Image: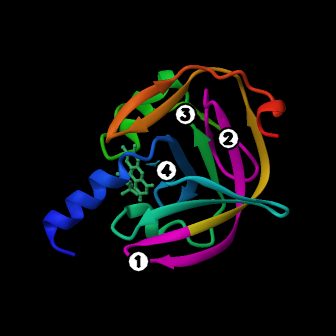
Amino acid sequence: MDTASALALRSCLSRFVTGVAVVTFDGPRGRSGLTVNSFTSISLDPPLVLVSVARGARSHDELPGRAFCVNVLGAEQEAIARSFAGRPAGEHAWLDHPVAPRLAGSLAWLACQPWREYDGGDHTLFIGLVADFGHRDGDALGYANSRFTVFAEPAYGHEFLL
Ligand SMILES: Cc1cc2nc3c(=O)[nH]c(=O)nc-3n(C[C@H](O)[C@H](O)[C@H](O)COP(=O)(O)O)c2cc1C
């Protein structure tokens, strides 16, 4: 694909509004992580989630076979999203977890055991088996049109899923 087409495709895809998460794990560099918006749920039985990681990311070659935690970010955590997207900014508040280290203050978190990895072109799809999870109420950090945004707290409840 030529550069103009690639830019047009990125612009097209940027209309799909997402949340923002940081994938954290214990790797060869110690506790590390990367910001993603490619997170999606896949299956409830078994409980599976997916993140797509660029082959060029340092984490790409560190994640295979490792447990990881998906930390869904709250509205006030934009600085954390930027920090794990290549602009390191100070220390992070980590919490220990028997599966994988996680970030303090996240809106939701899912600790995953490695399940499968699939070729995804210039990315690899990492599928994790959810071993533990938790969440809190609050506004969510969002990403739309290549910009951070905020989603005001929705009325969380199962009735809206049915
Ligand atoms: C909002 C946002 C979403 C991102 N989503 C992804 C993603 O889904 N997959 C990915 O590989 N990189 C994504 N990135 C880029 C990585 O966070 C960035 O390349 C990071 O520096 C990789 O870290 P590493 O090289 O230490 O692994 C995203 C960045 C931002 C700001």
Circle 3 or circle 4, nearest the eye: 3
Which amino acid type corresponds to the residue marked 4 in the rendered image? Ser
Question: Which quarter of the figure is the N terminus placed in?
Answer: bottom left
**Residue indicated by mark 1:** 121
Q: Earlier in the sequence, mark 4 or mark 1?
A: 4
Left-right relation of 91 to 93? left
**Cα–Cα span, label 2 and label 4:** 16 Å
Question: Residue at horizontal 14%, vertical 64%?
Answer: 4
Colour mode? rainbow
Q: Earlier in the sequence, mark 2 or mark 4?
A: 4
Span colored in magenta = 96-125
**Cα–Cα span, label 3 and label 2:** 9 Å
Q: Earlier in the sequence, mark 3 or mark 1?
A: 3
- Which structural element holds mark 4? strand
Which amino acid type corresponds to the residue marked 1 in the rendered image? Gly
Residue 73 image label: 3
Residue 32 image label: 4
User: Looking at the image, do the residues carrying marks 3 and 2 touch, with CB atoms under 8 Å apart?
Assistant: no
Left-right relation of 66 to 6? right
**Cα–Cα span, label 3 and label 1:** 27 Å
Q: Is mark 3 within 8 Å of ligand 1?
A: no
Residue 109 image label: 2
Toward the viewer: 27 or 129? 129
Q: Within the magenta stretch, is there residue 124?
A: yes
Q: Earlier in the sequence, mark 3 or mark 4?
A: 4
In the displayed structure, would residue 7 be above or below residue 1?
above
Q: Main secondary structure of the magenta part?
A: strand
**Cα–Cα span, label 2 and label 1:** 27 Å
